[in-house]
Image (cartoon, rainbow, N blue to C red):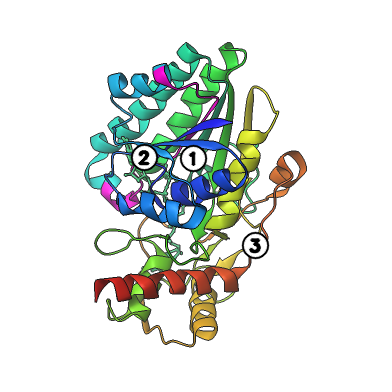
């Protein structure tokens, strides 16, 4: 298939591009580089031996996006492009609503106009809000605590409504749990600008000495060791889930959790990182972070049954590959 990947130079997008190429698909990438670097394109070429066509455009802008649809016979779209920093979304909500909603509306309209029948959307477990885990796809969506989460719930609604009235417009909403890890080559991974918000990149930077210690946000949750529990998923497994989704023959609207189905606490993750990589990660227990829930993990059985997808990589693979990537970042800096 000829597939347009928006946000294809970002963390999850770049790994997905590699998996699509490995499965024989033709890939086009649209990315405005607001949270990624053009060098990732060369790294994709280094690893795969193929260089996807790249368009440096903002997908909230109709004209340049339409040009791609008009010129290329796109058969499927995977829409990763979006802003994703939860804290920042509280500070600058309009930027988040503008970017994340307009991009989705624009791309959906263009798919309808040009007869692109497959739309895969990056949603998030955050849409489940605070309900008991495991989260199942048919659970109601609860209000999230931040504008970022709202943009995901609203985008889901927009695409659901569009799929309902347009036969042949087949939408798959993928609700990701907590993607971590990196490509086995160590060439691509998660490389956030500034101080990371998320646990794994923060741990990796503490291990490399770029940050002095990790703050663990609370040890008084009702979990086995009191720290928050999440469903960490290797980004390569997550990327393969997208290949299954875009290749799926399912019609209409379909929703899948992409997670392992296993919960891991913050302390378990940190201790796995320390043990597997034989490197210290100093940490302090601090106050809870506002907006965090105690436990989030998936019921991942629907994706297995309907897409034939399940995770293959474990927590050790995740922490080792994250560290492998971080070490290379360090050596590139020096
Ligand atoms: P990322 O920031 O690494 O990748 C997003 C990419 O989109 C970046 O390369 C950025 O430059 C690009 N982009 C942003 N706005 C754009 C626009 N208007 N036009 C063109 N390009 C634009 O993020 P990621 O972690 O790879 O996440 C990908 C998607 O998955 C996002 O939609 C995110 O909200 C969603 N998601 C991520 C997580 C996570 O924990 N990483 C969890 C759930 C959902
Ligand atoms: N945590 C710390 N210290 C840190 C960072 C995080 O203790 O420095 C803890 C958090 O309190 C939480 C766990 O580590 O218990 C995971 O936190 P992350 O920030 O890595 O991830 P979240 O589960 O909060 O959120 C992530 C993404 C969201 C996405 C959600 C579900 O940031 O965008 O996963 O997919 F919606």
Label 1 CB sits under 8 Å from any ligand 1 atom: yes
Label 3 secondary element? loop
Q: Are marks 2 and 1 in contact (CB under 8 Å)?
A: yes
Residue 185 visible (yes or no) = yes
Quarter of the image where ligand 2 sits: bottom left
Magenta stretch containing residue 78, yes or no?
A: yes
The residue tagged 2 is 82
Could you tell me if the residues under marks 2 and 3 are in contact, i.e. CB atoms within 8 Å? Answer: no
Residue 163 % position (x, y): 57, 19
Residue 223 visible in image: no
Judging by the rendered image, the residue that carries numbered circle 3 is: 262
Within the image, what quadrant is residue 248 found in? top right
Viewer-nearest of discs 2 and 3: 2
Numbered disc 1: secondary structure: strand
Which residue is drawn at the image coordinates 50% and 24% (left, top)? 74
Return the x and y of residue 220 as percentages of the image width and height: 47, 72
Q: Is residue 111 above or below residue 332?
A: above
Q: Which residue is mark 1?
A: 122
Whether the residue under disc 2 has CB within 8 Å of ligand 1: yes
Q: Residue at x 24, y 34 (%)?
A: 94
């Amino acid at each position: 298939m000829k597939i347009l990947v928006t946000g294809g130079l970002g963390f999850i997008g770049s790994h997905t591009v590699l998996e699509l190429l490995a499965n024989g698909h033709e890939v086009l990438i649209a990315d405005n580089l607001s949270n990624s670097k053009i060098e990732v394109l060369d790294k994709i070429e280094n690893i795969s031996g193929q260089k996807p066509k790249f368009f440096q455009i903002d997908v909230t802008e109709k004209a340049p996006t339409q040009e791609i649809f008009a010129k290329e016979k796109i058969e499927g779209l995977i829409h990763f492009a979006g802003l994703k920093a939860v804290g920042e979304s509280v500070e600058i909500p309009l930027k988040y609503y503008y970017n994340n909603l307009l991009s989705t509306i624009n791309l959906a309209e263009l798919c309808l106009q040009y007869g692109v029948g497959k739309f895969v959307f990056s949603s998030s477990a955050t849409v489940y809000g605070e309900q008991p885990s495991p989260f199942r796809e048919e659970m109601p969506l609860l209000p999230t605590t931040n504008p970022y989460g709202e943009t995901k719930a609203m985008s889901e609604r927009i695409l659901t409504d569009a799929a309902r009235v347009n036969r042949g417009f087949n939408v798959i909403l993928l609700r990701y749990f907590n993607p971590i890890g990196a490509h086995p080559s160590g060439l691509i991974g998660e490389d956030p600008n500034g101080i990371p918000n998320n646990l794994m990149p923060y741990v990796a930077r503490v291990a490399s000495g770029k940050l002095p210690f990790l703050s663990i946000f609370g040890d008084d949750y009702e979990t086995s060791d009191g720290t928050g529990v999440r469903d960490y998923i290797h980004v390569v497994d997550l990327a393969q889930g997208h290949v299954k989704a875009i290749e799926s023959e399912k019609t209409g609207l379909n929703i899948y959790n992409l997670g392992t189905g296993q919960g891991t606490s913050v302390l378990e993750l940190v201790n796995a990182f320390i043990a597997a990589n034989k490197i210290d990660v100093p940490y302090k227990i601090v106050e809870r972070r506002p907006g965090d829930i105690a436990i989030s993990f998936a019921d991942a059985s629907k994706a297995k049954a309907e897409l034939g997808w399940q995770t293959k990589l474990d927590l050790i693979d995740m922490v080792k590959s994250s560290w492998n990537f971080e070490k290379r970042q360090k050596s590139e800096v020096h």
